[in-house]
Amino acid sequence: LQRLLTPGSADDDVVLECVIIVGTLASDAESLPLLATSRLPILLAELLAEKQADCDIMLQLMFAVRCMLLSDETGEIILLETEAVGHILQMLEDMLDEEHPELPSALRAAR
């Protein structure tokens, strides 16, 4: 999984299936210690930056990251060793700009 999830190393369909597998593992408490000792949390964060144009991959990435954030072991890695939160906030900001271009400039400046 780590090799296939390295950004740029696999076709998007393969990446999507691998992210689904990681999300499934992340939703299982017994698998979380294994994920915490792997590079997968960091690779998922890198994919958040790279795959923002692919809605299917982003949806599965968000699920996997959410599951990891709910665990102390993997949550600390996501929060302290990656830019995942920044990538998620940037994605939300981009979505807000696309859906609500009428927002006042003062509100935009407050972000």
Image (cartoon, rainbow, N blue to C red):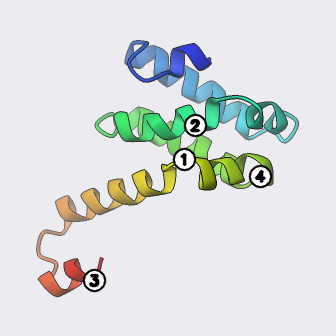
Furthest-right residue in this view? 30
Could you tell me which secondary element the residue under label 2 belongs to?
Answer: helix
What amino acid is at disc 3? Ala
**Are circles 1 and 3 on residues that touch, CB within 8 Å?**
no
Mark 1 surroundings: few (<14), some (14-19) or many (≥20) residues within 10 A: some
C-alpha span from label 4 to label 3:
32 Å
What amino acid is at disc 4? Ser
**Are circles 4 and 2 on residues that touch, CB within 8 Å?**
no
The image position of residue 79, as x and y in percent, is: 61, 55
The residue beneath circle 2 is: 42
Sequence order check: which comes first, mark 1 or mark 2? 2
**Are circles 1 and 2 on residues that touch, CB within 8 Å?**
yes
**Are circles 4 and 1 on residues that touch, CB within 8 Å?**
no
Image check: 11 left or right of 24? left
Image check: 42 left or right of 87? right
The image position of residue 65, as x and y in percent, is: 59, 45
- Closer to us: 36 or 107: 36
Mark 4 surroundings: few (<14), some (14-19) or many (≥20) residues within 10 A: some
Sequence order check: which comes first, mark 1 or mark 3? 1
- Closer to us: 63 or 36: 36
What amino acid is at disc 2? Ile
Sequence order check: which comes first, mark 3 or mark 2? 2
C-alpha span from label 1 to label 3:
25 Å
The residue beneath circle 3 is: 110
Sequence order check: which comes first, mark 4 or mark 3? 4
The residue beneath circle 4 is: 71
The residue beneath circle 1 is: 82
Sequence order check: which comes first, mark 4 or mark 2? 2
